[in-house]
Amino acid sequence: MPEPLPAHRPTAVVVGAGVTGLLTAAALTEFADVTVVERDLLPEGPEPRRGVPQARHAHLVWSGGVRAFDELLPGLVGEIVARGARLAHIMGDMVSRAPNEIWFRRFTSTHHRNLVCTRDLLDAVIRDRVLADERITLRQDTTVEGLLGDATRVTGLRVRSGSGSGSGSGSGSGSEVLDLPADLVVDASGRGSHAPRWLTGLGLPEVTEREVNAGVAYATRLYRAPGTTAELGFPLVNVQANPAKAPGRGGIILPVEGDRWIVTLSGTRGGEPTAHADEFADFALSLGDPVIGELIKCAEPLGEVATTRSTANRRRYYEKLPRWPDGFAVLGDAVAGYNPVYGHGITVAAQSALALRKVLRATDLAAPGTARRIQRATARPVAAAWDLAVGQDAFYPGAGDSPPTAVERFLARFVDRAVATGARNPRALGALLDVMSLEKPALRLFSPDMLIPMLFGPKRPHLDAPPLTDEERGAAG
């Protein structure tokens, strides 16, 4: 008797080969054959590419994202570490001053470890792992022209492929327009997503958007790790901006692979850093604490200063649209982009891919209503990161169309108390990091681990200086 023919596998198309797109593709391979459509030509290794201009600046993956990485792709974090990344204990391997100008003690009792490396390395390892899957097809140098289908169901994508179609130089004489049919299309194309226009083009209503823009500008310079800091395993050094003192200025030193430091400085309206190399260290010395400037003033710079102003918090509430087409979902920065200072974008991307996989394990990929369930499920990690970012940035002058509400002001005051408590109590710090790392919801801040030390102590005194050890200071020269 002949063997039965294999059952037809559904097809999915993912727009974008960034972190969100690749992790989404990895999640989808359990249920479908996947095509990833990417405008750029991807590099072979850990090299910069045009579609990720923010890669020069400091990046990290919170422990909630680290867990999601390994749940999606077992062993992925180990592969990234083997290529030079570091799992940094927060706060043990970190010297950090909170927005309310309190230095955290370097407690080591929490389980939280953040993944630290250059964005180029992170992208390269994820690309290598995900694109090695034979169920995934990559179409590079391919630009999406629009959705196929109608207001009830998206059936695929129309794309233009070849001859530099993603270069922004026009259609190209050798380009080809073709249709890619799919049971599910996922837009993971980032902040520049055209999904709002695509959906209205199908006859669907406009999506509600909100922007909270603290007016932050970033300037980043790469340095050779000074002295013997590379051998020591130097801590991350972070001075966060204070929204109560506009303009807010902050900075971070991120020790990364190759015995280098990524130093990113930031400032809000009226206090922005510039691209002038000779002003970089002076700006770092002008922060609320000069520790970053002191550490880099004699370090060797590697290259020039890179700047960006693309830092607004911007969210699109797709999950609230009264109608949603089957066969289409939007994930990652295409839904919400955050002020990069909070470092939540990659963690949200990984958790959103996990949420998508969870939905598809419970319902058929092409079934009516599945896409809407995906959109609602993936909105949960988005909302958690959004509330944390907006809870700070909304207090900068001119950040939004309306001032913070009474509830937002109350929550901001409570978070300040939570930070002050966590800075000197390890139980409270654990609760605070559970929320900041997106491992647990904000209600964790109202648990006994936080409330008992907040209300009753015992309370150690706050530190009045960055908690660098004598050995660390000596290693930095």
Image: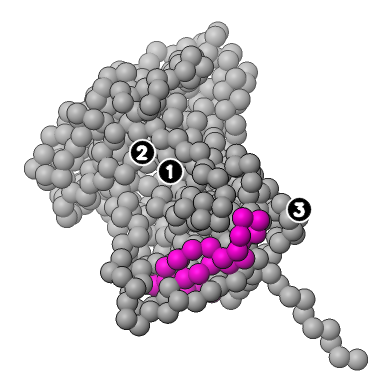
Q: Residue placed farthest to the right in the image?
A: 1
Side (left or right) of 424 relative to 325: left
**Which residue in the protein does label 2 denote?**
312
Q: Magenta segment range?
A: 137-159
Instruction: Point out residue 18 in the picture as x, y percentages from the top left corner.
Output: 44, 59
Q: Which mark is residue 454?
A: none
Instruction: Point out residue 355 in the picture as x, y percentages from the top left corner.
Output: 63, 49
Magenta segment: does it hold 192?
Answer: no
Q: CA distance from mark 1 to mark 2?
A: 7 Å
Magenta segment: does it hold 156?
Answer: yes
Q: Secondary structure at mark 2?
A: loop
Residue 337 shows up from this direction: yes
Question: Three-letter amino acid code at disc 1?
Answer: Gly
Instruction: Point out residue 134 in the picture as x, y percentages from the top left corner.
Output: 58, 76
For label 2, count other residues whose C-alpha is less than 10 Å away and answer few (under 14), some (14-19) or many (20+): many
User: Which residue occupies the foreground of this view, 172 or 1?
Assistant: 172
Circles 2 and 3 in contact, beta carbons < 8 Å = no
Answer with the quarter of the image where residue 252 lies.
Answer: top left
Residue 98 shows up from this direction: no
Circles 1 and 2 in contact, beta carbons < 8 Å = yes
**Which residue in the protein does label 3 denote?**
362
Question: Three-letter amino acid code at disc 3?
Answer: Ala
Question: Three-letter amino acid code at disc 2?
Answer: Ala
User: Which residue occupies the foreground of this view, 12 or 450?
Assistant: 12
**Which residue in the protein does label 1 denote?**
337
User: Which residue occupies the foreground of this view, 317 or 310?
Assistant: 317
43 w.r.t. 67: above or below: below
For label 1, count other residues whose C-alpha is less than 10 Å away and answer few (under 14), some (14-19) or many (20+): many
Image point (53%, 74%), residue name? 179
Quadrant where the C terminus is found in the figure: top left
Quadrant where the N terminus is found in the figure: bottom right
Q: Point out the frontmost of discs 2 and 3.
A: 2
